[in-house]
Image: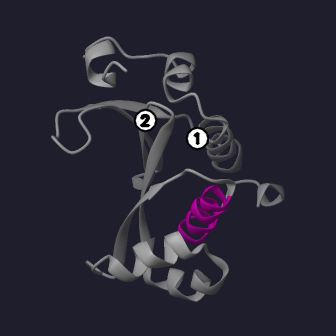
Amino acid sequence: LMDWNAIYPGPEEPTAEQLAAYVSDPLWDELNRWICEAYSLTPKYAYSRCSMGRGWNVKYRAGSRALCTLYPTPGAFVCLVAAPAQAEALLPTLSAYTRELWNSAKPMNSVRWLSLEVSSPQVLEDVKALLLLKQKPKHAGQA
């Protein structure tokens, strides 16, 4: 499979459709749609030269605050979220995978940076729960 970075090296921004086709995972579409609807946000595409996540990524910002960043890979994607300390209370309701990530992440300024590979509907629900804790949605009915 071709590297994302090779297909879209920048500065040409990929479309939402191209990103969805590249990831080709229904969870990608579901999470993007949910964030856009719940928070009335539009995604910002950013090109990263960082060696860890080189290539295009999708950032969601609520005002000046970063909500999360999505890193597309073929057939999968990672959601990077800075989970606040209050997320500790959610742990019993989250998947074993997410709990393990939380426990292995070192707190920095009372947040833990979680790089969640969204590979199951359960992890998708974990991401939603963390985002809802971080930032209240614009529309109460979306939660």
Q: Quadrant of the N terminus?
A: top left
Task: Residue at 34%, 82% (x, y): give it.
Answer: 110
Q: Which residue is mark 1?
A: 41
* Residue 34 in the image, given as x and y percentages of width and height: 69, 45
Badge 1 or badge 2: first in the primary sequence: 1
Say whether residue 53 is left or right of residue 87: left
Q: Which residue is mark 2?
A: 72
* Residue 98 in the image, given as x and y percentages of width and height: 51, 71
The answer to whether 27 is drawn above or below residue 101 in the figure is: above
The answer to whether 111 is drawn above or below residue 19 in the figure is: below
Q: Tell me if residue 132 is in the magenta stretch.
A: yes
The answer to whether 10 is drawn above or below residue 143 in the figure is: above
Q: Is residue 10 visible?
A: no
CA separation, marks 1 and 2?
19 Å
Q: Which mark is residue 51?
A: none
Q: Secondary structure at mark 1?
A: loop
